[in-house]
Amino acid sequence: MPDPKISIRDLYIRYSDGRVVLDGVTYDILRNQINVAFGPAGGGKSSFVRVLNRLIDLADVAEIRGQVLMDGRDLLAPDIDVIELRRKMGVVFSRPIPLPLTIYGNLSFGLEVAGMRDKSVMDERVEKALREAVLWDEVKDRLNDPASSLSGGQQQRLCIARVLVLEPEVILLDEPTSALDPVTTAKIEEFLDKAKEQYTIFLVPHNQQQASRMADYAGFFLQGKLVEYGTGEQMFLNPHEQQTRDYVTGRFG
Amino acid sequence: MNKKFQENLISNAIRIAGSSSIIFILLIFLFLLREGLPALTEVAPKDLFNTRWYPIEGLFGLLPLLSGSLIVTVFSILIALPLGVGTAIYIGEIAPRRVNEILKPTIEILAGIPSVVLGFIGILVLSPFMRETFNLPTGLTAFTGAFLLALISIPTIVSIAEDALYAVPKTYRDAAYALGASQWQVIWGVVVPAARTGILTAVMLGVGRSLGETMAVMMVTGNAPTMFSGLNSFISPIRTMTATIASEMGEVASGSTHYHVLFFIGILLFIFSLIINVSSANSIKKRTAKSRAQVVS
Amino acid sequence: MKAANDLDWGNPTLNKKTIQALGFTLLRLISLLTVLPILGIVVYIAVKGGSSISWEFLTAMPRDGMRAGGILPAIVGTFYLMLGTAAFSIPLGLAAGIYLSEYSNDNSWTRLLRIAIISLAGVPSVVYGLFGLGLFVLFFKFGISILSASLTLSIMTLPVIISTTEEAMRSVPYQFRIVGVSLGGTQWQTIRKLILPQALPGIITGIILGLERAVGETAPILFTGATFFLPRLPSSPMDATMALPYHIFVISTQVPGMPIQIQYGTVLVLMVFVLGMNLAASLIRSRARARRQW
């Protein structure tokens, strides 16, 4: 088994309103693999994503326990440079959220706030990211158009490019294709298959079929607990736990 | 590190600036108290609540001023309430969109007209009209002031009442229509009663606006500090608290009793406005919370 | 046979439809009654004052005890007061509005703050004048000056700018902040580069409306900065100044033999100033609505 990029140990999260969204989850996100977390709604997967890049700091959390170790450092520690972390861990959300800027501006935003001033370097990075996200050819002549003028599928690829331009180590995707048509979905899944050679991918798929298509390694989340974990093949073709089997065979959804 | 320092500096500056309003309102209150409370020691309370305001002879009876403000305000609301609420209902429930596109900006224009301009028109147009039509010795009367105050408070009443009517859930109306009611019956049987708190708030804010108005009343009410004496008072000159401060402050020696009493009147105005505005804001907040809850449920 | 529309009053002419028609007409009349005086006033002033407006009127100094010549010092004075008010109220108001929208939590301090803002908004203008007199003119010894008047007007304008800024910031979708932060931006960077630019039209509208009110007010400047006879234009913030609203007040009530034309002309100038700002604000508001990117 490939070595872990991020090791989560006994993660416990309780919100101010009393809900326990993650209850002692231990999970390894493996280097250069597509790591999947799947399961019915309310399983804690979205909160899991938000812990990884500390977006959870913005939410109303009452208590967090456990460890999230990346390259030996606990990401939950208070002395972590959260801003630097977020550049290393890009996140793509379930709805495309283009910033109210031009296409170019969406990509240069992350570079500008990081302090980059050299326009020619920015231009290079922007083009590279757009090519990786398979969007360059479609937008290269209209980089100064507002990003809102793109179609839904193009916008989501823009959001992916936005993450790529910061040269992250990990890409987190929370139901990235839930608002997209099948053709665009296929393009993005194709992208992820290629991208894992360079990045570590953590994906929350928006349906089970996507989960079984994409997962190299997968964890089944049910009501805040990690019920079972294994390779993609094993989880979907031959799950050990009864609950996993029930979910995978469609007994509950 | 420089960037982190910068970020902290900015967010601290914003926090401090954010809280500045508390400092200002406290400053205002404290200053009013500082300069106005001495009036209570320099003038015996029974003299303050006297019916004669004649500072030159040391008479500081506030009652005529309170009476003047009251008369003008009450009368202006009598005019502004039906006009304002009626217009709000028309705009909100009946008027077609194209009419509203003219109506609403016009009311906004009224809101923007400076009160000194309204006072000016009052002197040159309204006052002679009053004098000639009603055969009065002078056109500078409580009624003239009330009319101008009505114009001044109507935009406030229309705007808040309109919001209140708009906030009535569509389900209320739909249910009434389903029971066979005409639009008129829906408006008066369902919508207006449902919005009555908001409409009341609108009127209260209109009252607050009238009470605090200075220039228009100063220019047209004749500035005679007389007590209310029956219906005749409406067409006689009176004087409001605000006009008193504005007209006499310039000629008063700093630190004199007259000076302190004027500040004391300021305290009264401050407190009245505070009560009106804070309770109105409270009621608006409750209403938005309630209608939000209704939408969710 | 009773039709469904008949009220059971025994009076066949007074059915629901008739009542409604009468009622609607009544409300139409009421609205007309409300609107006519407004239009009447504006048109009347425009007509009566239009003939006084000339290049000389707008740019020359007054002569003959204000009874002839131009009203330049009043116009310039109003301008200076507007700039002074803007200088103090915009930075403070913007910061406070941003604070309420982006940095504050819903705790007792914030609630207290909001009560303070509402209270400031409700203070009568003449009480602001008293306060300005007590604090700026006398206590700080700034004297009757543009400075005292501007500071007084600024505090009066603050609540408007704070509320419109907060509202404008809040109307920008929350997701932009999340995205901004997840791309490695600090809170201020996200506000400055993403939220503030989008909220700007609403903020500017609020500023214009706030300044519009400040420009038209007389009572706050009565004892803090306004004067009637000024031999030359103000040369420093410590000078007193003429101003259009105060000028109108004095020439219409306290100057015998004041030509009526000058009075109407001055009023027209103030109206154009104020309504012009109103128009500018409306245009900015509707243009922004059309160009919104979300």
Image (cartoon, coloured by chain):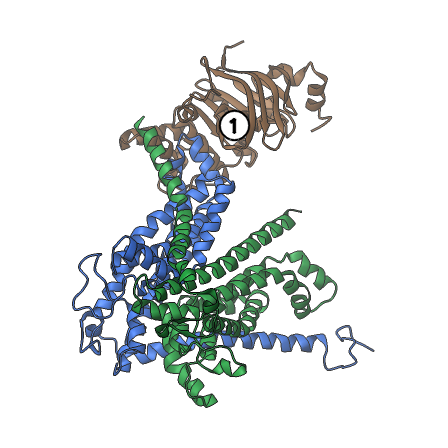
Q: Is residue B178 above or below residue C163?
A: below
Q: Which chain is brown?
A: A
Left-right relation of C187 to A10 = left
Q: Is residue A5 above or below residue A54?
A: above
- Please provide percent x and percent y for residue A168: 41, 23
Q: Colour of chain C?
A: blue
- Please provide percent x and percent y for residue C74: 24, 68
Dot 1, how many residues are within 10 Å of its Cα: few (below 14), some (14-19), or many (20+)? Answer: some
- Please provide percent x and percent y for residue A52: 50, 23
Q: Nearer the viewer, residue C228 or C16?
A: C228
Q: Nearer the viewer, residue C21 or A92?
A: C21
Q: Nearer the viewer, residue A134 or C231?
A: C231
Q: Quadrant of residue C247?
A: bottom left
Q: Is residue C235 above or below residue A242?
A: below
Quick one: SS at disc 1? helix
Q: Nearer the viewer, residue A200 or C75?
A: C75
Is any atom of residue C50 visible in this view?
A: yes
Give the number of callouts: 1
Q: Colour of chain B?
A: green
Chain letter for mark 1, please. Answer: A
Identify residue for label 1: A50
